[in-house]
């Protein structure tokens, strides 16, 4: 069963329901007991008065009349003692009789076929019942209000350590290696056990994050040396004038691949740092990064028979993290090249934003929401990509406060729009 109320609200509701149940049971019990006892007492009193009157009847002594609040009738009685028609059907025993706007308690006896009926006005009894009902209702309402108040106070006292623990767990500093443990701040109760469990979980999470950062940093750092060797070798090859065109093209291709890998290594290193000074990072304007990437990707795009269209604009001199911007824009251009067989690829700049559009195969509608998740590819049959390019784009955008969206071009193709925000 799923509850929409908070835990504190559930505690208050539980107190209110428990109070309503207990107070209601007591109220019903009190009313039933008082009503039963009073009815038994009235029945016994009326029965005694009726027996006294019957004894007077057998002795032919009518000097003892009924009490002032009583009425006495019997068969063949005369005057005030004549038995009314509405009372003749009553069976022997105790009854409650309504006559007009008044109600009476009645005791009936049948002796030798003669009916004897003694009535007693129950106005006082009804007044006592009304007072009793009012007291019970007021007590029920007060007990319910008191239960809600106690539930609220108890909920605040019980939930206070839980809320404090939740705030501490949500705090980013708890993921730092020097963050103090949570358990010493709590008693050895259920909340304390929860704090111990959080300490253990946060410890494992800190270790996992540390291992991930170290792994990324170590791998990225160790890749620099072979990349430098490859880049230097390619420079030496390209400096050879006797190199045939085919070999030169391959060397230039290796050089571009080394530059891309160097950019990726720098990107991963920057993302792996838990704290980094953005002011020390290399900054560049949007047109600078776009012009560099257009010159880098124009030849591969045109070699595939596609048209690369670059639409610059007056976007000011706002500067952004060059490494991240280069990686985001480069991955989107690579993605467009990979999924476009004919037509065009367009890079458009705007104030604080850019777009990469293509006329490729597009992205199935059922995959558009998941395209920025790791290992998700638009078309599983194209190439051997792992589906990590757009995931890296999303991760960088989240890190920098940028926004990336995907729309569909008609009749086919897609467009990625990146909003870079204010920049510096």
Image: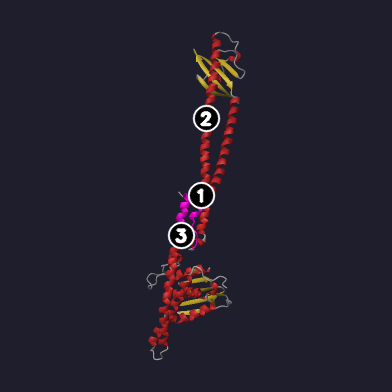
Residue 32 badge: 2
Residue 199 at what x, y percent from top left?
46, 57
Q: Residues within 10 Å of mark 3 (few under 14, many from 20)?
A: many
Distance in Å between CA atoms under marks 1 and 2? 37 Å
Magenta span: 178-205
> Residue drawn 53% across and 20% down?
44
> In the rendered view, would you say 221 is above or below 136?
below
Most common SS among magenta residues: helix
- What scheme was used to colour the molecule? secondary structure
Residue visible at 51% across and 80% down? 291
Q: Callout 2: 10 Å neighbours few (<14), some, many (20+)?
A: few
| Quadrant (top left/top right/bottom left/bottom right) for the C terminus | bottom right
Of labels 1 and 3, earlier in sequence is 1
Q: Which one is closest to the eye, mark 1 or mark 3?
A: 3
Q: Do the residues labelled 2 and 3 touch (CB within 8 Å)?
A: no
Q: Is 69 contained in the magenta span? A: no
Residue 7 got which mark?
1
Residue most extreme to the bottom: 242
Residue 200's spot in the image, x, y percent?
Answer: 44, 57
Q: In this view, does 165 lie to the left or right of 246?
A: right
Q: Is residue 126 visible?
A: yes
Secondary element at tag 3: helix
Q: In the displayed structure, would residue 27 be above or below residue 320?
A: above
Q: Of circles 1 and 2, which is in front?
A: 1
Q: Which residue shows up at 57% across the image and 43% down it?
A: 149
**Depth order, front residue of 209/335:** 209
The circle on residue 202 is 3
Q: Is mark 1 on a helix, strand or loop?
A: helix
Q: Nearer the viewer, residue 312 or 115?
A: 312
């Amino acid at each position: 069963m799923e509850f929409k109320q908070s835990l504190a609200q559930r505690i208050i509701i539980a107190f209110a329901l428990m109070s309503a149940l207990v107070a209601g049971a007591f109220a019903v019990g009190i009313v039933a007991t008082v009503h039963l006892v009073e009815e038994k007492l009235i029945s016994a009193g009326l029965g005694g008065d009726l027996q006294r009157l019957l004894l007077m009847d057998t002795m032919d002594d009518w000097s003892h009349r009924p009490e002032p609040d009583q009425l006495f009738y019997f068969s063949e009685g005369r005057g005030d003692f004549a038995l009314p028609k509405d009372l003749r059907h009553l069976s022997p025993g105790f009854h409650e009789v309504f006559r007009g706007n008044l109600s009476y308690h009645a005791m009936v006896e049948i002796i030798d076929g003669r009916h004897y009926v003694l009535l007693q006005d129950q106005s006082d009894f009804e007044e006592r019942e009304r007072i009793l009902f009012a007291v019970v209702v007021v007590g029920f309402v007060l007990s319910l209000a008191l239960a809600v108040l106690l539930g609220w106070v108890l909920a605040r006292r019980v939930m206070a350590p839980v809320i404090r623990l939740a705030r501490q767990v949500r705090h980013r500093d708890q993921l730092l290696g020097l963050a103090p443990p949570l358990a010493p701040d709590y008693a050895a109760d259920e909340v304390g056990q929860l704090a111990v469990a959080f300490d253990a979980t946060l410890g494992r999470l800190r270790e996992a994050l540390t291992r991930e950062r170290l792994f990324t940093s170590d791998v990225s750092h160790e890749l620099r040396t072979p990349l430098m060797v490859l880049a230097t070798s390619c420079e030496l090859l390209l400096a050879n004038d006797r190199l045939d065109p085919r070999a030169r093209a391959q060397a230039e291709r290796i050089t571009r691949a080394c530059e891309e890998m160097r950019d990726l290594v720098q990107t991963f290193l920057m993302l792996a740092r838990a704290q980094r000074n953005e002011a020390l990072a290399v900054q560049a304007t949007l047109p600078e990064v776009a012009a560099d990437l257009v010159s880098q990707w124009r030849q591969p795009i045109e070699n595939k028979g596609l048209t690369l269209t670059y639409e610059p604009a007056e976007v000011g001199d706002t500067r952004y993290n060059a490494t991240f911007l280069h990686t985001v824009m480069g991955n989107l251009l690579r993605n467009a090249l990979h999924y476009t067989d004919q037509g065009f690829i367009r890079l458009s700049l705007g104030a604080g934003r850019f777009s990469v559009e293509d006329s490729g195969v597009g992205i199935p509608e059922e995959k558009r929401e998941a395209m920025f998740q790791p290992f998700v590819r638009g078309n599983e049959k194209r190439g051997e990509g792992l589906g990590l390019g757009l995931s890296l784009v999303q991760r960088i955008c989240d890190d920098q406060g940028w926004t990336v969206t995907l729309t569909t071009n008609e009749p086919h193709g897609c467009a990625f729009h990146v909003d870079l925000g204010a920049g510096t």
